[in-house]
Amino acid sequence: MAICANDAGRRLLLLLFAAVFVSLILRPAAAESNSDLVTHLLSLQYQSQSGVIHLDDRLVSRFLTSTKPPRPYTLVVFFDAQQLHGKPELHLQDLHREFAIVAASFVANNPNNTFPAHAKLFFCDIEFKESQSSFALFGVNSLPHIRLVGPNVKDPKESEQMDQGDFSRMAESMADFIQSRTKLSVGPIHRPPILSKKQMGLLIAAMLFWTPFLIKKILTGETLLHDRRVWLSGALFVYFFSVSGSMHNIIRKMPMFLADRNDPSKLIFFYQGSGMQLGAEGFAVGFLYTIVGLLLAFVTHVLVSVKNVNVQRFVMLAALFLSFWAVKKVIFLDNWKTGYGIHAFWPSSWN
């Protein structure tokens, strides 16, 4: 009986030693696995010029679905679709460019991701055509779309989504979204300069070279600023730019036309509804306004110098007819878009 008890004790001790040995081996292996994931992400980030890591279905599986939470990092994912870049109303290319600016600013402000292991932040993008499974994994069915996957997120569909209404401020709103969800500061947004150092140097050299010739032209009155035709062209441009709604088109980034949803082979140049104006529509109205303005200028400055009364009357009638036609078209377009009508009334004293 004593021999059996000793054998049982020895087996129990062997089992305890084996359990301790296995735990000591597995614990560093898990830590090494997390370290390998972060190292891989840092390597992909370093290879990207903007700091945005391009993910596909395989990498999404490696960094998200195959890694149990808590993960030692947070991912900010921009969902993109190359086939939708032709739709200007989505602004996918502009938003992706702003997303890359945020990523580059974060990398510049936080070199080597100098945060604690649980607070590392990486910027990624996923393209629809090559990673449709990842789109389904996140439940993405509309673009633009940005998700923030925290360390403790189990299901990607439960990750934080950026509100599409916050895209108006571009990079700044993306940085605010990240800071509000992760308590990590992206830092100042570093936008690339309009001109590179080489371009700036060439521009300064050209200005220094042409300065003496420019001064000579100014003193002799032979510059374009002394030409009346340049001022006339500039006045016409400012007038057309103002009445055609070009500033609205630039600010809102409105397209010149849209494809008909019912028949993609047809183009829509005039949009019915008061909430939207296409570029071609604004140019058409601006052209009509410019016709009226030019006719008025011609009648008041040129026609009055004509001595033949019959010619004056004929040109005046033609100008009135064209002006009436142009204004009528503008009123018709406004009525068609908004439903509001303009009616003429005789003076009450004439009744």
Image: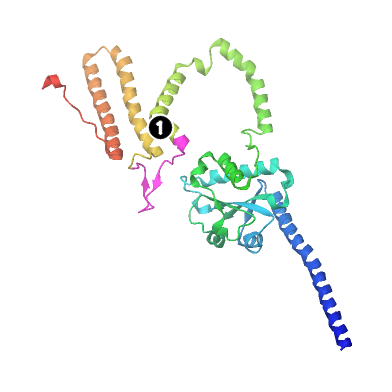
- Asked which quadrant contains residue 177, the reply is top right
Where is residue 272 shown, x and y percent of the image? 32, 42
Where is residue 251 shown, x and y percent of the image? 47, 35
The residue lying at 65 percent from left, 55 percent from top is 151
Where is residue 182 shown, x and y percent of the image? 62, 47
- Pick the front one: 63 or 329: 63
Q: Which residue is mark 1?
A: 245
Q: Residue furthest left?
A: 351
- Asked which quadrant contains residue 191, the reply is top right
Indicate whether residue 90 is drawn in magenta.
no
Q: How many marks?
A: 1
- Pick the front one: 156 or 191: 156
- Can residue 31 be seen? yes
Q: Which residues are magenta?
A: 249-271
- Pick the front one: 126 or 61: 61
Q: What's the image's color scheme?
A: rainbow
The residue lying at 54 percent from left, 44 percent from top is 95
Indicate whether residue 265 is drawn in magenta.
yes
Q: Is residue 18 above or below residue 319?
A: below
- Pick the front one: 224 or 40: 40
